[in-house]
Amino acid sequence: MDYDFAIIGGGIAGVSLAARLSGAGRVLVLEAEANLAHHASGRSAALYEPRYGLPPIVELSLASGQYFHETPNILSPRGLMIVAKAEDRAAFDEDCAGMDLAEIGLDAGLAMVPILNPETVASVGYADHAWDIDTDLLIQGFARQARSQNATFQMRAKVLGLDRDGAGWRVRTTTGDMTARVVVNAAGAWADEVAGLVGVAQIGLTPLRRSMARLPAPNGLDVSRWPMIFGAGESWYAKPDAGALIVSPAEEDLTTPHDAFADDMVLAEGLARYEEMVTAPVTRLLANWAGLRSFAPDRIPVIGFDAAVPGFFWLAGQGGYGFQSCPAASQLAADLILGNSPDADTALIGALSPLRFA
């Protein structure tokens, strides 16, 4: 075999797994684009809020905390705020309970974010247990670790076919053919398409578009210390970014795997929801873009060997939680591939396993 492990997909999932596996065998990462993290990983809101998501995601995210806090310069303090209108109180209470935020008064909220609108903001919640993730530093760190242990990265290598070849696989790509003992499907929004190349039962991964706009700092204020702000029920969010503010409608619009772009109408509607809660109108955009968040039908990631096809491993369906959960998710995946005893308990392994769809 040319390689022990061929990982399809050069986003955070595939690259972090390459770092974990590279000391245990010959690793190949195949990325269809010219650069790593081109699609979903490169368009993340980049927040580590470990209590954000369904229970299995929260468990992975909390388990990733040691890696994040011990790796220099990956995290920087941000904090998280939720604001709500009076009629959104139920959603506000649910959000605060789920992510362990404390309700604070409007005056305290205004001290942090002076553009909050006192006429519309009825409730404010806040927690300091949220951090910015330097996503480029994280993914490049994993890539350096993998390369230092002789992992190979092939860019512009779209996978055209996968065929069983004895005890392993023949992988056909736009850059040539190679063989591998194990194939890892870390192809993000394209993961079901990759499964289809070998007749593996598709899981039903759903790519959902999320749009973003970059705005000048409101009223020329210094936004660097503002928290990330959610509208109750995740109806929109805003986050400081390099002296500007990124605002998202937080939409989840069904789409197909592609190089996503923002929907102007959806973006305008989301910006209107944001504007309703602040006193600074949106007068211009610096840029806009979109990314894909891909989910399994139960919105829980899929990590494990396929039920029917030997040597085919799933690492997909991370949704919007790939960065905040990647240290623990990649370690679990590597342990399962290598036959090691994972730190994760059996309940979590079962919740993540593709066997749940068999």
Image (cartoon, rainbow, N blue to C red):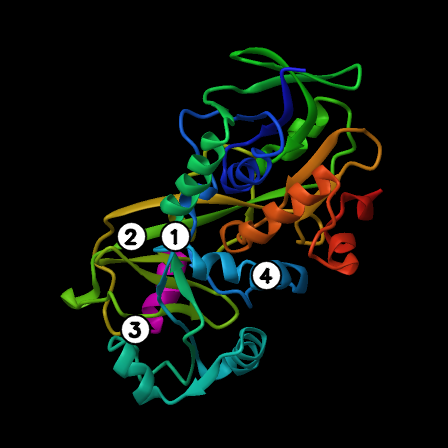
Measuring 61% from the left and 50% from the top, which residue is drawn there?
329
**Marks 3 and 2, Cα distance to the nearest angstrom?**
16 Å
Magenta region:
267-277
Tell whether label 4 touches label 1 (CB within 8 Å): no
Q: Quadrant of the N terminus?
A: top right
> Pointer 1: what residue?
267
Q: Amino acid at mark 3?
A: Val
Q: Amino acid at mark 4?
A: Ala
Residue 37 appears in view: no
Tell whether label 2 touches label 3 (CB within 8 Å): no
Instruction: Specify which label sits upstream in the sequence, 4 or 3.
Output: 4
What SS does tag 1 mark? helix
**Marks 4 and 2, Cα distance to the nearest angstrom?**
32 Å
Instruction: Specify which label sits upstream in the sequence, 1 or 3.
Output: 1
Q: Amino acid at mark 2?
A: Arg
> Pointer 4: what residue?
63
Left or right for 289, reference 151: left
> Pointer 2: what residue?
214
Mark 4 or 2, closer to the camera: 4
**Marks 1 and 2, Cα distance to the nearest angstrom?**
11 Å
Residue 351 percent location from the top left of the image: 75, 55
Residue 18 percent location from the top left of the image: 55, 35
> Pointer 3: what residue?
278
**Marks 1 and 4, Cα distance to the nearest angstrom?**
34 Å
